[in-house]
Amino acid sequence: MVESRRGFLAGALAGAALASSPAWGQSAFASQRVAVQTRGRGPDLILIPGLASTAAVWSRTADRLAGQRRLHLVSVRGFGDLAPQANARGAVMAAVAAEIRRYIAEADLDRPALIGHSMGGQLALRVAADAPARVSRVMTVDSSPFFPALISPQATLGDVEPIARVAYQAVHFLGEEALRAGGRGMGLDLGGASDALFGAVGWQGGDRAVLAQALYEVMTVDLRRRLPEIAAPVTVAYGWSADRNSPRSRADALFRAAYARLRRPAVFEPIQGAEHMVMIDQPARFHAAVDRFLA
């Protein structure tokens, strides 16, 4: 987790340069929910960051792919330095997914590929389920259609909703440190999901109300019933460890169970040595997986 946070900081700093680079253009797409940056030429690829992250987390990936793809980097308003605008009120994820679908239609993208990290992976799954004919393929990065399934495949919404309410209150009223302390105080044993739910989730800051609401939704949204609606092939990349003493050693079985309801079997890409920030923790291995995904 420490390594993930150090890597994320480096990625965020690099992303500041990315955002101001003249090679990047701000899309003309007007949205109260998301901002989109574009770069490159070729088949369309949409990159969606996770909870409390912005396009900065994709800086290395974007630099590598800009010569091969037309990139569309989504940032959720209310994360990082972006003002929350419409995300300050009510639910976040369904509305953001709808805006990504609208962007695909208004920008006339030709069946783009989607890559989403963490919460962004859930958004990508939702877009692919809502508009199966408009998406060519999906990669989720350390993301689950139901995050509690990474604790136990038998976990239910009833199991996690009280924890999610505490998490919401901790972030909304007290901040991230209280969230982590609250998790420890409840004696939670989250195993390999701990860094995704209460730790190195890429906290780049943002509007506290938006962060709290988005975290609550990430913990309670269950998209497993919608997996059969996805027509596009799905690749699942995630951090993994060969060390049996590491919670990440159990990740393979947990991710495979989480995606079992897909119409066609997913391709699984365990990234050894990575934790939650896979693309920053192990960029070479992650980029090799992306190459296979896009081939």
Image: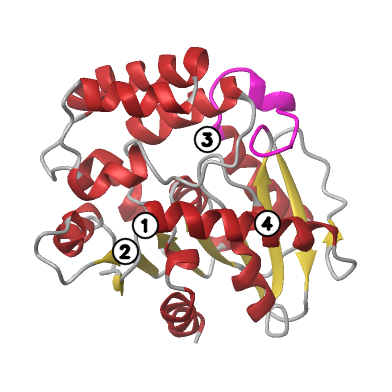
- The residue pinned by badge 4 equals 13
Image quadrant where residue 204 sits = top right
124 falls in the magenta region: no
- Front label number (1 vs 2): 2
Q: Is residue 221 above or below residue 139?
A: above
The magenta span reads: 78-94
Q: Mark 2 falls on what kind of element?
A: strand
Q: How crowded is mark 2: few (under 14 residues within 10 Å), some or many (20 or more)?
A: many
Q: How crowded is mark 3: few (under 14 residues within 10 Å), some or many (20 or more)?
A: many
Residue 115, image x, y percentages: 52, 63
Q: Distance between the residues labelled 2 and 3?
A: 24 Å
Tell me the amino acid under the disc marked 4: Leu
- The residue pinned by badge 3 equals 93
Residue 220, image x, y percentages: 33, 30
The residue lying at 17 percent from left, 54 percent from top is: 247
Q: Mark 1 falls on what kind of element?
A: loop
Residue 60 — which label? none
- The residue pinned by badge 2 equals 239
- Front label number (4 vs 1): 4
Q: What main secondary structure does the magenta stretch of the protein show?
A: loop
89 falls in the magenta region: yes
